[in-house]
Image (cartoon, rainbow, N blue to C red):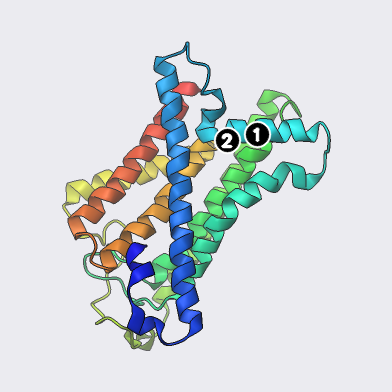
Amino acid sequence: MVKSLLTNRRYLKRGVGDWFLHRSHALLGALVMSHLIYRYTCFFAVLWLSFNPQDTSLGVHHDMGFDGDAARVLSWQQQDKNFWVCWQPMVLLLFPHLLLQISGFGFRIPPKRHPEGNRIWGEYRWHALAFFTRCGSLLSLAWYNKTHPDKEDERQRFIHTQIVAAGIFFANMMVVDAMTRNFAKKPKSYFTKTTNEEEPEQVVGTIRGLKGSNGFKYLLSATQFHANLHCLCTQDQLSVQWAALTVVQSSAFGMTLRRKSLITHGLGLVLYASVLALGMVVIGHDWYRQ
């Protein structure tokens, strides 16, 4: 983000549009990363609370701080039951994340994947948008449950929530598969378009296409599997879905740093694995809570 703000001046001289796109995307990235860090700060504050039960000052930070947001909404609803009152916090929180995801389509990137696999390419950008949509939908589902308590008995709510969550999950899988098939059908000329970088040979597979040891890639795949599976357990806790959103947007940030040569390939893999590990900590805490 810093390099996007301070360099690439020759490229940015092409027009005001390019300048605004780069600067706004970098500023949105800084805002989004700060928000992700804030939510994890709330999460670890709750972990500290579990070791210090006498400290009651951190109660609003439960569920990455979303409990405090929901409590304010519930108090507002007592005075005004308007639809916007309930959804205003969620819309405002997710809007910068959505803008960041969409603004990324304004950049010219290689249509084919780099051999080391740790840089953004055309197909990944669409996949990231699809997974962001899934995260946003499941976050909205959990937010609805949190801000509409006692509308039905617990068993019925569990069943209804699981049906909706499963529908979102499998619809997302079908959309991503359709995107993959669409890119597979593209003519060879699409992958030989002129870009700022030399085009390497195409590498397929998200994890399998990474340059790294098989054992390391197996651990990444296993972590992704458990994270996706736990998305089906959505109830009224937003932390698990927020962890998934963190993986989607921070991995793109890491790929950007790698493309700008600000980090090495190995460090990029470590950062991605670290974000997945943080997500597993959130999942473990959610299992323990249940």
Q: Residue at x 32, y 67 (%)?
A: 3
Inter-mark Cα distance, 2 to 1: 6 Å
Q: Which mark is residue 66?
A: 2
Place of residue 129 in the rendered image (x, y in percent of width and height, measured from the top left): 50, 62
Q: Position of residue 35 (x, y in %)?
A: 48, 47
Residue placed most toward the observer, 9 or 145: 9
Residue type (three-letter) at the residue carrying disc 1: Ala
Judge from the rendering whether residue 286 lies leftward or rightward of residue 154; answer left or right. Answer: left
Q: How many marks?
A: 2
Q: Residue furthest top?
A: 54
Residue 236 visible: no
- The amino acid type, in three-letter code, at marker 2 is Phe
Residue at (20% x, 47% y) in the render: 216
Is the residue 87 above or below the residue 289 in the image? below
Residue 131 point in image, percent of width and height:
49, 55
What percent of the width, then of the height, locates residue 261? 23, 66
- Left or right, residue 115 beside residue 11: left
How crowded pointer 2 is (Cα within 10 Å; few <14, some 14-19, many 20+) is rated as many
Tell me, yes or no, whether the two marked residues, 2 and 1, touch with CB atoms within 8 Å.
yes
What label does residue 70 carry, if any?
Answer: 1
